Amino acid sequence: MMAMLRQTTDRQDLLRRFQQFSQGVQSTNQKFYHKLLRKEFEVRFEQLRTCLQKLNDDHLKIDEFKWFLTANGFRQLLALLGRNQQGIGTSSLAVWVKNCENIHEHNLKHDEISQMIDAIYTKIDEGFYSYKINYEFILFMFVCLVSGDFIDCEGSGLFQLQINHSCDANAEIQYLHNNSQLSVVATKTISMGEEITINYLSECDRNRSKHSRQKILLENYLFICQCNRCLAESNQADETSDEEEEENVDDNNNSESNVEMED
């Protein structure tokens, strides 16, 4: 954002576009802060703010960005990024895998390649301790570590096109051109006039209970989901999914931190 402001010929227009993103630090009922603003992050929060403030004062000298580097402005900035950023999944590995998947079924090596791809992604998750293909190739894979929904994530970006969430989404984000160009790809038939939605949750969170999904969305995006799936599951008990039980102690501690911040 600072680089864009430094390079643009119309800083006020760019600032207006930044301000169009949802950037509130609290939920609409003013009872829940964005998780990036929890008390346990305060020291690192201030260190990062101070470093960026010094960078701007000593080198970039962007007057229009100074408000974002105040204590309150920086909170808004983190919330803006936390609520609106989209992971960018691009890499030469992704292109190679996609090309392999397009090999016609009659190709004799198709099954072998598919098995190797599966093994590569398994080893990315587990570590590369004992895989038996070319070692240099494995080192190359190491740069493509898991990040969010994308195995090949190079970072995140702000896109002007903002698509709403649904736990039963009809589209997904893909990077078909191995660059920062985002593609919205339908995952099911979309009727005329039907809203296009994507799922903000990670793959491992999408099958959790309604209570668990809404808890994650509230922490990250400060809203309570009212999609068709959540409404259909409205009779479910407000209980956390089994796989989250071990995290409850940490979550309770974080909730206490949030209460202190609200006071």
Image (tube, rainbow, N blue to C red):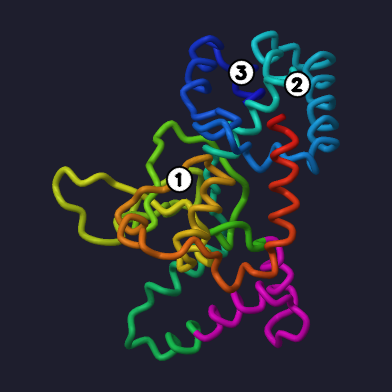
The amino acid pointed to by label 1 is: Ile
Label 1 close to label 2 by CB (< 8 Å): no
Q: Which residue is mark 2?
A: 71
Name the residue nearer the viewer: 162 or 218.
218
* Residue pictured at 61% horizontal, 78% vertical: 122
Give the numbered dot on residue 224. Answer: 1
Q: Main secondary structure of the magenta part?
A: helix
Identity of the residue furthest to the left in this view: 192
Residue 185, numbered label: none
Identify the element where label 2 is drawn. Answer: helix
In the picture of the structure, the residue carrying the numbered disc 3 is 5
Q: Quadrant of the N terminus?
A: top right
**What's the residue type where badge 3 is placed?**
Leu
Residue 165 pos. (x, y %): 40, 47
Q: In this picture, which residue range is highlighted in magenta?
A: 115-143
Mark 2: few/some/many CA within 10 Å (<14, 14-19, 20+): few
Q: Position of residue 84 (x, y in %)?
A: 52, 37
Q: Give the mark nearer the N terminus: 1 vs 2.
A: 2
Q: Position of residue 236 (x, y in %)?
A: 41, 65
